[in-house]
Amino acid sequence: MSCYLIKVENGHKVARSITSEEEYKQLRGSNEQKANLRLARAGNDAAKRRLVQFNYSGHYPQGVVKGMKLPSGAFGFDMDEPEAFAKAAKLLLKEPDKYGLLMLERSARQGGHAVFEREKGKTILENQVRIATMLKCEMDTSAHDINRVYFTTTSDGEDLLFLSPRLFKDAYDEAAVAAEGKVLEERERYGQEELPEGAHKANKHYEPWKEEFKKDSQGVFKGQEFKNSRISSSSASSSSASTAATSTTSAAQDNYLGIPYGEIIKKWWQLYNDGQEPMRSNRNTLTFELAVNLRHICGFDRNLLAQIIPCYDGFPEQEKMACINSALNEKITQMPKRLKDVLAALRQEKLKQGASNGNADEDSEALVNALDEANAKDDLFYYDALPKMPQGVRDSISAVGPALAMPVITAICPTIGMLATGVKVSVHGKMNSLNLISYIAGDFASGKGSIDPVVDAWTSEVKQMDKMYQQQEDEWRARKRAAKNKKEQPEEPKLPVRCLTLNNTVANLAERLANTEGKHAFSFTPEADTVAQKWKSAMSDFSVMLRQAYDGTSYEREARSADAVNVHIEHLLWNVVMCGTPDALYRVVNNYTDGFQSRIVVARTPDNTFTPLTDNLFVLTETQREHIRQIAHLLPLMEGEVVLPKLENKGREWLEQIRLETMKNDDKVKARQRFRICPTTMRMMTCIMLCKVAETLIQKHGFQGAEKQLKQNPLLWKEMIVKTQTPTMLEAFNILADYQLDNALYFFRSRIEDAFSSKSYCGQTTYDRSRRGKNDSIFERLDVTFSFEQALQQSIAVKGANVTREVVRQMLKNWKRQGLIGVLPDMRYQKVQPAV
């Protein structure tokens, strides 16, 4: 069937497939969803637009909504009138199989939505007429668009009246769906007659059972035949305009999760402008900053922002709208930290109010819960932006849940790189092996342990081989002990054990790495303190080995004694995954100038401090384990060098984007981090696309057939991976790269800055972590026309009191050279182009 979560990202609708009943109910059952539904039922249109949106009628294999016309196996049915819905619901719940019912819910306006199985070969409108005839109810003739979304309600029994697991079954034959979609689109466009007289376009409802419909043997309506009502673009635009106008009525009294926007704005100025509202000299910059932040809690609604943001100090409406438009055009990120701090401050105030009322203030408690839920939902920003992942990767995410999606991807990519040990990808003109090092950072009991069985599933076959080798080693040790006093000693075997423990010495580990027969070794530790304690006196050796492993360079270890370990490795191939607390991270990475930090991919588990204890819905099932095993078995069969031009271009675009952002903020730390993050992300993307190749082969030929194809045609995977460079797949590059950059700055920014400015950078001083992004840049803080002193002032505000005038002069030179600013005759500066 079909169920897709619909969201707006960077101004475009994107779709993510929902594949389980648990995930579907979880999306519907959040505290934030309940709070928005409560407000929507009270007449709050802005809250209604914040409700979770689903599509049931379309199929979106690339995750892109616009322009897609592929039909799903289901269709939606809208009933606006509460009484009509109540009558229809009784009939549907009495005999759901008779109608092919998949889902039934009470809508925000107390009407209802239903989802049914679609009869193949018929358009959505034809199926809707069929159901309306059976139920003898009115139908909405404007609700037949394949991309129509439904604002959903909650998972409570009074809202979600019926749900069938068949809604989440995904058994599409892509070729058949594409063929049928083309036929249905042609029929909608050319092949049907007008609607009956009772279905005038001016009135979107009509009663089909009152028309005399006759069917031929093909099931096509004859006599008074009909076609899909096609709303003209002019009427559609006027409809959307009226909707926008309605949404902004009384917006001044509107609120976010029960907190009036006016209260949020007031708290914003208290925290970030000493309680003062903007004045003529700074209103442009401050209004822009406010809009950039508020858009995250206003549904990115231009009209709503225009209503809630005042025109400060005589600000012309046109100029204010220009600031809002610029803010809406900014890159969409997670909710900015400053806005989170504002909401956190308001949360604390509500908690105090509840305490002063003897914990009897239910509204305050509900508000606090809704804010906590919204904060948890924001932690899913990167997960929600991900396109549909291939087999193996998708199963790994399902095994740990959405909250740990990015950490588990960070953990399995080094494993995939180890399995595809013979693959090399061109990065900036140089062939790179898939060498990756990652660290999953999270406080205790934050869910890191659930990643362990997933990594074990990926490495199960390699570990089986290692057990055989280790058994041979045990037998050799037994023979050696038995021949302790004999003249002839058994020869020590050189066995290619690939999964290596980090609870080891430098010499033993180096010897193991030399015996892998040119293949990748892999190390995983669920406790990074194992490294910190075992390698404490040799942490520099560990750092050097991992740096050389990332680069794939040679590794040499010489000793004079014949019995000592002598190692000569031409290309050190060793992928490592560590899990641990942030505190342990700083013990493992304690040097910030030698390049070790920039070679590690750091992921963060979400903050679950105040999360209520619930049953664990996410465990690695046998089906998921088998899917992972299939992909892991096929990866070693792929070998050779490949050039991915579209991936290369995507990496270069991202590098340039970050370069321009950091130049505006004179952010050298962030600018330098991008150099290693780009090739690391290209390697991770190659790992994911290799899984996509394996999945495609399995879907087409079956598991054994896929193995046979790769063995018979060793170049097949190269041809296929080039084709996986689709726009949707490549969108994952920005998500992975931005996620790495965000975490690198979160954990290491202040330490890196101190390391390059102080001789005592190896000290163990605790530093406050800071997160500065595009929304806080020096360039954006400045007005269109500004002086040197203003630039100096804003630089100090962002970078600290140690900023010198020479640093600011160099920054302005860089801006001028880049074409961002020009010099006026009075020696002031003017921005040449708006913020991008």
Image: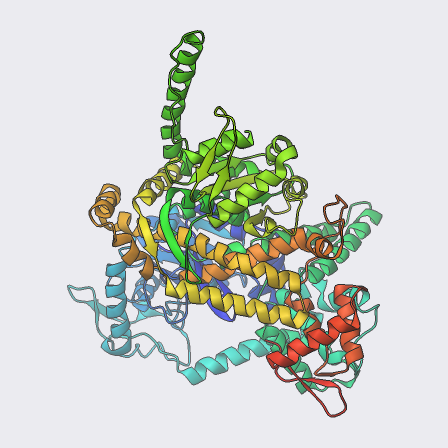
Asked which quadrant contains residue 494, the reply is top left
Who's the residue at 68% across and 65% down the image? 255
| Closer to us: 292 or 767 | 767
**Is residue 153 visible from the viewing direction of this image?**
no
Q: Image check: 714 left or right of 804?
A: left
Asked which quadrant contains residue 587, the reply is top right
| Closer to us: 451 or 72 | 451
How far from the left and from the top, in percent, is residue 514?
Answer: 43, 35
Above or below for 664 versus 647: below
Residue projecting furthest to the left: 217
**Is residue 489 visible from the viewing direction of this image?**
yes
Q: Image check: 639 left or right of 541?
A: left
Above or below for 561 versus 392: above
Image quadrant occupied by the N terminus: bottom left
How far from the left and from the top, in percent, is residue 96?
Answer: 36, 50
Above or below for 514 versus 183: above
Residue projecting furthest to the front: 560
How far from the left and from the top, in percent, is residue 106?
Answer: 50, 57
Who's the residue at 51% across and 39% down the image? 451
Above or below for 550 versus 69: above
Image quadrant occupied by the C terminus: bottom right
Who's the residue at 49% across and 51% down the image? 160
How far from the left and from the top, in percent, is residue 194?
Answer: 28, 79
Counting every numbered tag in the picture gives 0
Specify the color scheme: rainbow
